[in-house]
Image (cartoon, rainbow, N blue to C red):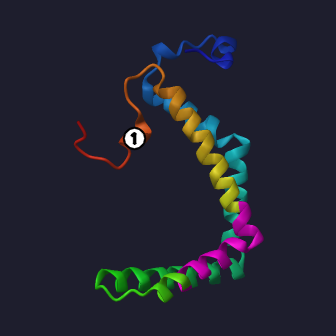
Amino acid sequence: MSTDSDVETGIDPTTRSPEAVAGDLGAAIAATDEYERYVETKTAVEESPEAQERVREFERLRDGFVQARQIGEATEEDRETLLAAQRELHSLPEMAAYLAAQQELDARLERLNTAIGTDLDVDFGDRIGSCCQD
């Protein structure tokens, strides 16, 4: 499969190593509107004192809930407290924008995964994090 830019530059991707083509793909992804928006919104969350405080609080509650669940002491009230903290965090404008940007980037990456897998008998998305699949 060649792209318009391959035709314009006279580059035949079949003569280049997959690693070289992957580097080009990474650069192309980094130049997409979805990726740029993701980076911008992530930075906004990282620079927001309120967002960072709510992230820390959510992580504290989540860690406590996970520990309580592991020893069989998590309650429905604990779960509701955790969910309320998550809703508060997600309601911040900068966090909502970040989550939307992350979703858009994930969708774009999924489309790219599908395009990459078109000529292959492998779905990379299904293989991520798995071991020893049949």
- Within 10 Å of the Cα at label 1, are there few (<14), some (14-19), or many (20+) other Cα atoms? few
Residue 17 point in image, percent of width and height: 43, 23
Which residue shows up at 69% across the image and 69% down it? 45
Q: Which quarter of the rendering shows the C terminus? A: top left
Front residue of 79/52: it is 79
- Residue 94, magenta (yes or no): yes
Q: Is residue 76 above or below residue 20?
A: below
Residue 21 point in image, percent of width and height: 51, 27
Report whether 108 appears left or right of 47.
Answer: left
Residue that protrudes farthest toward the front in the picture: 76
Report whether 122 appears left or right of 22.
Answer: left
Which residue shows up at 39% across the image and 86% down it? 74
> Within the image, what quadrant is residue 85 found in?
bottom right
Report whether 12 appears left or right of 72.
Answer: right
Amino acid on which the number 1 mark rests in the picture: Asp
Q: Which quarter of the rendering shows the N terminus? A: top right
Q: Is residue 12 above or below residue 127?
A: above
Residue 43 point in image, percent of width and height: 69, 64
Q: Is residue 52 above or below residue 112?
A: below
> Within the image, what quadrant is residue 26 found in?
top right
Per the image, label 1 sits on a secondary structure element best described as helix
Residue range in magenta is: 81-97
Which residue shows up at 72% across the image and 73% down it? 91
Q: Is residue 118 above or below residue 50?
A: above
Q: Which residue is mark 1?
A: 126
